[in-house]
Amino acid sequence: MSYAEIYQRSLTDPEGFWRERAEELPWIEFPPTILDQDDNGAWRWYRGGKTNSCWLAVDRHVDEGRGAQTALIYDSPATDQQISYTYADLRERTARVAGGLVALGVGKGDRVVIYMPMVPEAVVAMLACARIGAIHSVVFGGFASPELASRIDDARPKVILTASCGIEFANVIPYKPLLDEAVRLARYKPDKCVVLQRPQCLAELNADQDLDWVRWEAASEAVDYVPLDATDPLYILYTSGTTGKPKGVVRDNGGHAVALHWSMQAIYGVDTGDVFWAASDVGWVVGHSYIVYGPLFRGCTSVLFEGKPVRTPDAGTFWRVIQDHKVASFFVAPTAFRAVKKEDPDCKLKRQYDVSSLRYQFVAGERLDTPTYHWLKEHLGIPVIDHWWQTETGWSICANMVGIELMETKPGSPTLPVPGYDLRILGEDGRELGPGEEGAVVIKDPLPPGGFPTVWEDHERFVESYWAAYPGFYLTGDGGYRDEDGYVYIMGRIDDVMNVAGHRISTGELEEVVANHPAVAECAVVGVADPDKGQVPLGLLLLKDGVNIDPQALESELIQMVRQTIGPFANFKRAVVVKRLPKTRSGKILRQVLRKMVDGIPYVTPSTIDDPDIVPEIEAILRQEGVLSTPSDLG
Ligand code: COA
Ligand code: AMP
């Protein structure tokens, strides 16, 4: 069947379509219901079905005779190691770690926070939680203590799993002091922390709170998987919203498994036995879906890469990994290739490696700029597929579905909606817009399997943030349009969320930190286009009356505050003092106008602004400070 036929069928007969996709997987008990609504009124897939995501990802492959196949390749230029785990190895370790969690009193529905670098134990930890029905919440290792603390308070984990350090290029980042500080800051205290000691930096263990991972795992007894309801939560993953408080996106077991299992073949064009590599981090949704669950559900071999695109040791690392492990499909954020392109503009290093195994190059996480698209096309000579999705959906909303039908690619477009997503473009008045007209990109309910049914313990926020703006439609938060052929173009966030090097960051969260400085009366943080990172934050500051401070000293202090409160990956490096901020007469800062101004996009000064000269005045200050003179090569 063609893409168009499959897409149509998914919308006209969603239950029939998703029943068939569910039949492609084994179940402990096949779901009696395909789609219905829960007590909150949220759409749920496969209610009443029994499954277990760890069993689907690991045990069943061993039972089906794939125990000796490599499940996971840990490739770590950071530590100069390569270790392979078969599906049988993964079952053995996962069952034991699950037993260790049970011994610590963790059971179905309990939360476990995982704050770990890119080591195999992070994958084992996630699967071990899934095995016993505990809900994991992985926190990206780049987050500073206060961010970790707010997630601990929201998820209230019985146990935290961590490691003594992460490695960023040649820098060893000790995790344990960050964790200890987070536990100190959090109102809620976990029962225990289990620490994987890495030789690069040994952590000091506190006898009352901490356990040594290796001894704990060795002393644990393996436990079997428990049957779970398809609608039981598998994990919580916090993501930035428009306010400072992160949102706990909840993922369930059944719909997630069906969607990801299908996506491996239909979107990424790989199947059982193929090697798949997503060079992201287990702390992000890409890591959850396509380092851990998706490839393992499908019986692929997944690569877990602890390194960077450059300087580990050079800009040829990607090609080396593809060659060494015969990667068939590779997925990475465009920013990573921009880093490679900067160091090796003619892609000379690729010539040293045999990358003939590579069939498809996938990119997502931020807009794929046209220069990077053309660079990849020219140097790879294989389809370069931009696809668009987000933490909330868990898998692609738009893609060129190479496993169904490879369609024409158009630079700047992630192609067409994936089956199951009834995508529309709406104007501010809720009217559906036609070709070429830019508006809010929304999905008519229900979201397909894999989509999130709620925000952790805050269903009201789920409704308010995502479903209230256009009743019956899920608000993606992105703006965009469709062309005459229906191709979708995503133009960027229409809310106060930024995308910095493929990391999603809330401007509200940054503003809370900056506004905490004793010299700052008020501030606005906006994302500015950046040739390497896509966007970087810029702080616009109003000082308190009578404050006399050197602007450079203030900038340095603010940079440190953001690093220590949110984390270094926010890339907060510029803060400029302005005389006034543009506000409506009711006092709301006009961030949208500021966003457009800094990106050189024509803006209309709204009539509600208290003084129309303020924005040009800020623009002049930014030019004088050299903030707006950076040439951007983002096409
Ligand atoms: N732990 C601790 N610190 C981290 C970190 C982590 N896991 N990740 C990043 N940081 C730090 C970096 O060390 C750097 O610190 P510095 O300011 O002291 O130098 C800072 O945060 C900025 O990081 P980043 O902007 O990510 O730059 P980078 O040079 O470290 O890495 C890339 C560049 C392209 C490799 C990286 O940005 C990347 O992988 N981005 C893609 C993200 C992604 O996968 N998103 C999901 C969608 S695919
Ligand atoms: P996250 O939830 O962290 O995965 O971030 C999701 C956001 O990243 C989306 O809402 C988009 O703003 C952006 N994004 C992800 N993929 C793409 C893409 N292919 N093109 C444009 N923007 C993207």
Image: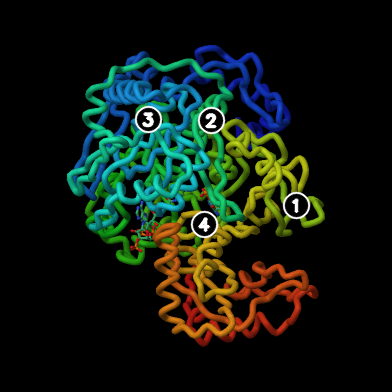
Which mark is nearer the camera, 2 or 3?
A: 2
Residue at 43% across, 44% down: 139
Do the CB atoms of the residues marked 4 and 3 lie less than 8 Å apart? no
Q: How many residues crowd mark 2 within 10 Å: few (<14), some (14–19), many (20+)?
A: many
Percent x, y for residue 465? 67, 47
Can you give x and y, in whole percent of width and height, for residue 279 in the image? 37, 46
For this view, does 148 lie left or right of residue 407? left
Q: What residue is pinned by disc 2?
A: 256
Q: Earlier in the sequence, mark 1 or mark 3?
A: 3
Between 498 and 421, the one lying in front of the other is 498
Mark 4 or 3, which is nearer the eye? Answer: 4
Which mark's residue is nearer the viewer, 1 or 3? 1
Task: Quadrant for residue 335, please give it.
Answer: bottom left
Q: Look at label 4 and name its amino acid.
A: Ile
Residue type at mark 3: give it.
Cys
Q: Nearer the viewer, residue 94 or 564?
A: 564
Q: Secondary structure at mark 4?
A: strand
Alpha carbon separation for disc pair 4 and 1:
25 Å
Where in the figure is residue 549, as x and y percent of width and height?
47, 83
On residue 426, which mark appears? 1
Q: Tell me how far mark 2 sits from mark 3, CA to CA.
A: 17 Å
**Residue under numbered circle 3:** 300
Q: Which residue is mark 4?
A: 505
